[in-house]
Amino acid sequence: MPTINEILHTMDYGPAPESTKEAQAWLDQHGRRFGLFIDNAWTGANDTFATTNPADGVELAQVTQATPDDVDRAVEAARRAQPGWVALGGHGRAKIMYAIARLLQKHARLFAVLETLDNGKTIRETRDADLPLSARHFYHHAGWAQLQSEEFADYRAVGVVGQIVPWNFPVLMLAWKIAPALAAGNTVVFKPAEYTPLTALLFAQICLQAGVPPGVVNIVTGDGRVGEAIVNHPGIDKIAFTGSTEVGRIIRKSTAGSGKKLSLELGGKSPFIVFDDADLDAAVEGLVDSIWFNQGQVCCAGSRLLVQESVYDRFIAKVKNRMQNLRVGSPLDKSNDIGALVDPVQQQRIHGLVEAARAEGCEIWQPGCAAPAAGSWYLPTLITGASTSAAVAQTEIFGPVLVAMSFRTPGEAVQLANNTVYGLAACVWSESISLALDVAPQIKAGVVWINTANQFDAACGFGGYKESGFGREGGKEGMYEYLTPLSEDARPGAPVVAEKGQVRQAEGASPFAVDRTAKLYIGGKQVRPDGAYSRAIGGADGAFLADVGEGNRKDIRNAVEAAHKAAGWAKASAHNRAQVLYYIAENLAIRAEEFAARLSAMTGVRDPQREVAASIERLFYWAAWADKYDGQAHQPPMHGITVALNEPVGVIGVICPNENPLLGFISLVAPALALGNRVVAVPSEAHPLAATDLYQVLDTSDLPGGALNIVTGSADELARTLATHGDVDALWRHDGTAQGCAEVERLSSETLKRTWVGGGKGRDWFDPKQACGRTLLQHASQVKNVWIPYGV
């Protein structure tokens, strides 16, 4: 008689096919030909292309290739509808969004089957993950619409939003994008992926049933030309894009100088870290969810497995055993784990990368099962023996391919995890909560899952660092992406020229009367410029005041290097950073008359004492915020919490304004320092002495060397260097030059660093609404969401 173990070993799942009857009937109702959805009406199906089932290659329907004229009409409809959508009020929008959520639930099975047919992912994923979370996003954001007047009283809708999504989560990406946009009062021109347009077209029907007003949601289908038309359209106020890093760079360049708000959720090469004290069996199951979910076609897939050396062999053996039990087959079979890739092009790309790794000497391991003959398939794959610089260890493969390597210490694990240009997500597995919570903040990623994987919720932000893009989706931080501060509307059209008075001359033995050359300030020391050039600075009356060093590319390089060496500033307590800012204010106050005299001599401003007093108050303001900009603890629908941490961006380059040279400098530098960033500042090109005179103030205020570096010189030339520097994480430019700001945005596309520019407009640096507040806090920080399960 066979033992129970032998019986269990021979047991297998029987077929559990999902019926496609309703989905096929829906396609037939439309004659399997679809036009565009513009202004709540369907256009004729012209110039169509086929969308096919990746599992068997069979055509599902013909879909329209939109033209630039179609995009024009969609944008015009959205523009006409936007004031009325705002006027409907938060409650009115909430009711419609609630209706959308209910209809998504009502038709969830139809959406799930249609998604599986069009995308190739398993019905279990579309049914149990994608659709419930899509409905959740509309429920959650209906709540934000209801609370908008209370929670976002100082903000307005951006306007018309262009949204472009990939093919890996078609309906879920739609919900991530459209729900917050509508909640905030925006109207939408939405482009689904060329490969997977069908659920977006079904969603258009849902919008009609839910009572969405004409023009509020417009859906235009087609290839990359349609996306390009949306990105470049002058009538669109914001672009929200999810897709490849390469296309993200193109969009950043295309929108440079346009004034369009931009959020990019791009590629990833996420680490999956397993420590030797982890529950290895649980970690294996988490790994399955992380890398083989959706055939690995997930931007945050845990495609880099890092295992502590002492358990590496044992863990790899468990992974291989689990891979043998993965079921590959029809996505419509509810017992299957691995479905089809979206298209043969994707299959060929994955195959090429894997074979290149084989040629480099890596071991390629796949389970002993066969893929279906028809359609686009790739077996789950494990690669070992790859170097850290190998293409498969650095390139986003976007398929069911896992690259494994070992580490010895937690420090080495962090180093390996951060050895990538990406920074989207990470997993940490350890039974030691202190170890996990020590490692999580050190990983440069926007999302870290502890002892779990691929958890998502509408209440919790999602987005990346570095070349994984910028901006967040979900949570309150995701709502801000679709809002504009009202203070931005109040900004003057050009930099404000201060009212002039009689120039106050320096007197007697004042240090300002001494002829000297102001040096640069790098690493806490005054240093001569690399090029040994200086520039004469004249006063408001034309008199010579002083020479300043003319910084160059090497000076910026040295300043950035000093900033990175000052990483301890980011680790210092918020209380400590606040104290330093208070000290700076105190020491500036002691020399207030000297600084007022300098401002008068440089700019001729009528009331220089006002600017000095405002600068001191501004330092107090940001010192006060240093230990009060707290994160949040979310309670998503899981047994645990998600901690949203406000982290410093890193090294921020700041191009300061010419107007109010002291106040403008402090208004930008102080918030960056308050939140733990290190700064490379280029002070006012016209009036740099307001900043160079601060050196002694900084030296006597306990500010660590390298936390703030000051390089005087040409704003244009130094901004170009900062924009293209790979170790600068963000760049702010507020010197009133529209062309220079556009150049910063364009040049930053190569490294995809965050930018904050003022364009050609001015800013009232005395107005707290324009120069203080939550907007600056958001620019000076990035949110990391750490998922922490408990009791499981």
Image: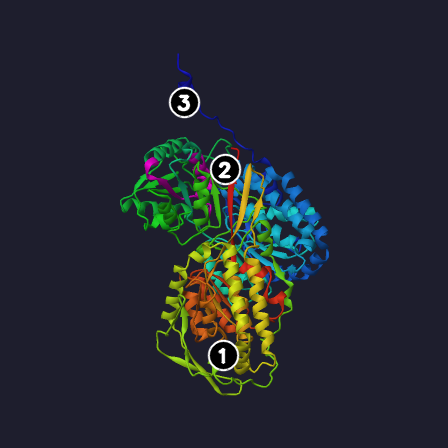
- Residue 338 seen by the camera: no
| Image-based side of 657 in relation to 526, left or right | right
Cα–Cα gap, marks 2 and 1 = 62 Å
Q: In this view, does 381 lie above or below 39?
A: above
Q: Where is residue 267 in the image (x, y as percent from the top left)?
A: 45, 52
Q: Nearer the viewer, mark 3 or mark 2?
A: 3
- Residue 623 seen by the camera: yes
The first of marks 3 and 2 along the sequence is: 3
Quadrant location of residue 76?
bottom right
Q: What residue sits right under mark 3 in the picture? A: 9
Kindly check if marks 3 and 1 are in contact, taking CB atoms under 8 A apart as contact: no
Q: Where is residue 263 in the image (x, y as percent from the top left)?
A: 53, 57
Q: Identify which amino acid the numbered label 2 is placed on.
A: Thr
| Residue stretch in magenta | 283-311
In terms of depth relative to the viewer, which is nearer, 557 or 3?
557
Q: What residue sits right under mark 2 in the picture? A: 122
Q: Which of marks 3 and 1 is in front?
A: 1
Q: Where is residue 203 in the image (x, y as percent from the top left)?
A: 62, 47
Cα–Cα gap, marks 3 and 1 = 79 Å
Residue 303 part of the magenta-drawn span: yes
Report the residue that reaches farthest toward the front: 509
Q: Nearer the viewer, mark 2 or mark 1?
A: 1
In terms of depth relative to the viewer, which is nearer, 33 or 468?
468
Q: What residue is drawn where x is 43% and y is 43%?
A: 302
Kindly check if marks 2 and 1 are in contact, taking CB atoms under 8 A apart as contact: no
Residue 430 part of the magenta-drawn span: no
Q: What residue sits right under mark 1 in the picture? A: 686
Q: Identify which amino acid the numbered label 1 is placed on.
A: Ala
Q: Is residue 270 above or below residue 763?
A: above
Q: What residue is drawn where x is 44% and y is 45%?
A: 438
Question: Circle 2: is it few (<14), some (14-19), or many (20+) Cα within 10 Å?
Answer: many
The first of marks 3 and 1 along the sequence is: 3
